[in-house]
Image (tube, grey):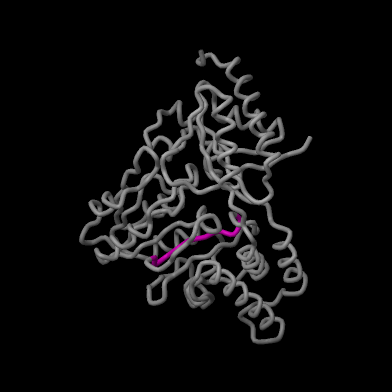
């Protein structure tokens, strides 16, 4: 049975060009990038080339890139390196919400029914002691694109810094760092391996370390750098990425046309081209994930870091869905390698799976 992957927001397959960039470093680039001998300096060259590639991808200076172990560490580094009050939203990734819970104080701004955070709500939440505003660029479950440039201006006008979790945005929507102080990205969302990410830190902005030891990453992130993963990350940042809007729309339209009582969550928000979140009345999302998996399709009922959770998605309940509606929702996320033929096959599998599950459902009539 052929298998098709539609869960790119959870993680992405490593691209062949990325593997090609990583393997030689694994074989021959074993040196410590902090060592002054030839193997160490070779590793340093590989590391700094990767830093330039990531910087070019984001449109910033290489000196503004801090390599991390992934998006979660990048988010934590930004949030916890700033003291004072923090403003964030109720649809953020747990990496943000959990870090804010450990800050001095924070305020949650509510998103609207389409998963959008309104700049006026941020303005109302800012206090005299607000040090940081953190709003994700693209929501990982809905795909809603937030107005971060306007929110950043509001933060700066109030004397606060601005951070954005760009893990689901980088490579999928244009990124303009002009008014942004911190920006987090993750390699495994960009067809690089897991365990590598980066935090953009605007030149002149303080970024206090959260782990201590050596002076790596300009003193902002101690620990010997993972040079092979950095090389892979740099290569991933140079991959050509197709516009997936037509495929996403084909998937949505095909499902909505053939499945009664199917609704796209957050349909009226500006959305990233690869993501759609659809709820199906009368079914359990986890059962749908299993049914599609048995037919050869990988999809998700929510954020991968929350898999197995009994509670429904905090993002979907935050936009006003009931527990039952949230738990009947499926996220489809496209990426490199998906084709029209795969999308059409997925539509057929969704139609068949929903019909089967609804026949078994005690609540669907």
Part of the protein shown in magenta: 180-188
Name the residue: 40% across, 42% down: 115
Instruction: Give percent across and percent down for residue 242.
Output: 62, 54
The picture quadrant where one finds residue 195 is bottom right
> In the displayed structure, would residue 105 be above or below residue 210?
above
How many discs appear? 0
Question: Does 185 lie within the magenta span?
Answer: yes
Residue appearing at x 51%, y 67% in the figure: 58
Who is closer to the viewer here, 226 or 60?
60
Tell me where residue 214 appears, x and y as whole percent. Answer: 53, 76
Quadrant in the picture for the N terminus:
top right
Residue at left offset 62%, top offset 49%: 335
Frontmost residue, 267 versus 192: 267
Q: Residue furthest left?
A: 128
- Residue 219 in the image: above or below residue 106: below
Q: Specify the quadrant of the image occupied by residue 205.
A: bottom left
Q: State the residue at coordinates (56%, 40%).
A: 249
Instruction: Pick the residue in front: 226 or 159.
Output: 159
- Viewer can see residue 214: no
Q: Left or right: 52 with respect to 17?
A: left
> Does residue 125 show up magenta in the picture?
no
Q: Is residue 153 visible?
A: yes
Q: Does 11 sit above or below residue 341?
A: below
Residue 257: x and y in percent read 56, 27
Q: Left or right: 29 with respect to 257?
A: right
Residue 324 horizontal/vertical position (percent): 45, 26
């Amino acid at each position: 049975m052929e298998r098709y992957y539609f869960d790119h927001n959870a993680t992405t397959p490593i691209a062949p060009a990325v593997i090609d960039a990583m393997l030689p470093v694994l074989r021959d680039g074993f040196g410590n990038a902090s060592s002054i001998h030839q193997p160490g300096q070779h590793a340093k060259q590989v590391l700094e080339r990767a830093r330039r590639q990531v910087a070019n991808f984001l449109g910033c200076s290489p000196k503004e890139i801090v390599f991390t172990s992934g998006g979660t560490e990048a988010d934590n580094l930004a949030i916890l390196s700033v003291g004072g009050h923090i403003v964030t939203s109720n649809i953020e990734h747990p990496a943000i919400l959990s870090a804010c819970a450990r800050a001095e104080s924070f305020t949650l701004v509510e998103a609207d029914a389409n998963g959008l955070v309104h700049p006026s709500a941020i303005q109302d939440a800012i206090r005299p002691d607000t040090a940081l505003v953190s709003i994700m660029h693209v929501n990982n479950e809905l795909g809603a694109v937030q107005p971060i440039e306007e929110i950043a201006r509001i933060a700066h006008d109030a004397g606060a810094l601005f951070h954005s979790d760009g893990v689901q945005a980088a490579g999928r929507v244009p990124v303009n760092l002009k008014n942004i102080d911190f920006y987090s990205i993750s390699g495994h969302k960009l067809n690089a391996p897991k365990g590598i990410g980066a935090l953009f830190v605007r030149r002149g902005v303080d970024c206090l370390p959260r782990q201590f030891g050596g002076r790596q990453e300009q003193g902002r992130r101690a620990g010997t750098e993972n040079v092979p993963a950095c090389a892979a990350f740099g290569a991933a940042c140079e991959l050509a990425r197709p516009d997936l809007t037509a495929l996403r729309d084909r998937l949505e339209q095909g499902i909505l046309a053939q499945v009664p009582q199917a609704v796209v969550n957050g349909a009226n928000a500006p959305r990233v081209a690869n993501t759609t979140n659809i709820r199906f009345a009368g079914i359990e999302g986890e059962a749908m994930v299993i049914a599609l998996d048995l037919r050869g399709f990988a999809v998700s009922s929510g954020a991968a870091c929350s898999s197995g959770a009994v509670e429904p998605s905090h993002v979907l309940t935050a936009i006003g869905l009931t527990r039952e509606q949230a738990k009947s929702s499926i996220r489809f996320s496209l990426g490199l390698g998906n084709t029209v033929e795969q999308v059409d096959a997925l539509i057929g599998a969704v139609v068949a799976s929903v019909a089967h599950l609804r026949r078994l459902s005690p609540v669907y009539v």
